[in-house]
Image: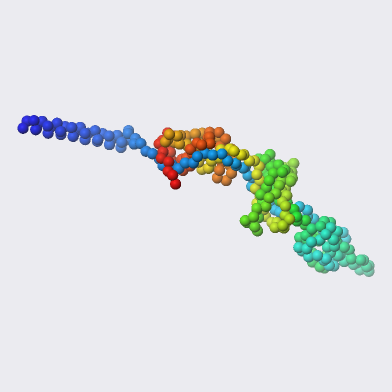
Amino acid sequence: MKKTVIWIIVAAFILLIGYRVVQRIAQRRASGLIEEKRSVPVRVMEVTRASIREILSFTGDIKGKEQVNVYSEVPGRIRSYAVREGQWVKKDGLLATVDRGITGLEFEPAKIRSPIGGIVGRVFLDIGDAVAPQVPVALVVRMNKVEVAINVVERDIPKVKTGLQASIKVDAYPDMSFEGKVTMMSPVVDPISRTSRAEITVDNRKGFLKPGMFARVDLVVREEKNTVVVPADAVLGRIERYVFVVEQGKAVRKPVSLGIRENNRVQVIEGLDASDTLVVVGQRVVDDGEEVTIVVE
């Protein structure tokens, strides 16, 4: 009987100690003294090499490569037109005649001729309207090539050079892209706008592009090939840029130096190697050295 009582007391004592230990651990966890390990789910990609381009975007107006306003050499009134808008006129072809009639005098009608071959883009006066040497009668445009004029801000002037490839888009043909080249870069800067004027020549033998159209222009000013390129969202930090990679099941923070950015991709000049396992989802919630679980889609 005594032995039974002793065993009961010992068992109760052990249970009491166990309860106290469990209670102490729970209290320490609650107070943050014991941190439970966690594994953060992330998605990753293997870093690879690719090509990336630096693109500058501009807007501008399309005009004919050659276009001239045609004037009458004498005053008078428009007597007749030999062409209509949209018609082709050859060089020195007749555009219009001018009645030079002065009271008491008679003159042969004066002839207005086109100095270039091209399309009659505009006729500015109606028959019977007064005309003078300073008043344009018609606009003639040579449209097999067109130009887009753009204004380049000071910081980008060193990047824009003649010969650069350009991609042009217009609202009339949203699914089409027209290729051109920078053919002129002004050597001066406008003191008011602080921009320099550049011209892009575009082949227009099919006639899709019309003078006066609004154009959006992308210039490829630099291209890097076989370089480390990653999603821009994978890069964190505003001043000191860094990424997370996975090594031996843990997130490792790596500082990086960046280069060209193209849309949602960015070039990494230093800090990453091809074949590194880059965190692309979950990088904002992991800490350096924290265990991670790679989630496969």
Q: Nearer the viewer, residue 107 or 33?
A: 33
Is 4 displayed left or right of 291 in the figure?
left
Is 43 displayed left or right of 59 in the figure?
left
Residue drawn at 56 percent across, 39 percent down:
49
Furthest residue toward left: 1
Can you give x and y, in whole percent of width and height, for residue 252 in the image? 46, 34
Q: Nearer the viewer, residue 280 or 58?
A: 280
Residue drawn at 79 percent across, 66 percent down:
126
Is 268 displayed left or right of 161 in the figure?
left
Can you give x and y, in whole percent of width and height, for residue 214 in the image? 67, 55
Residue drawn at 68 percent across, 46 percent down:
165
Picture quadrant where residue 81 is located: bottom right
Q: From where the camera sits, is residue 219 visible?
A: yes
Position of 114 relative to 181 (above/below): below
Residue drawn at 47 percent across, 34 percent down:
253
Question: What colour scheme has been applied to the protein in the rendered image?
Answer: rainbow
Is 166 displayed left or right of 125 in the figure?
left
Position of 82 relative to 226 (above/below): below
Can you give x and y, in whole percent of width and height, for residue 118 in the image? 79, 58
Can you give x and y, in whole percent of width and height, for residue 218 in the image? 65, 48
Furthest residue toward right: 105
Q: From where the camera sits, is residue 63 visible?
A: no
Position of 278 relative to 170 (above/below): above
Q: Nearer the viewer, residue 34 or 49?
A: 49
Picture quadrant where residue 210 is located: bottom right
Q: Nearer the viewer, residue 204 or 68?
A: 204
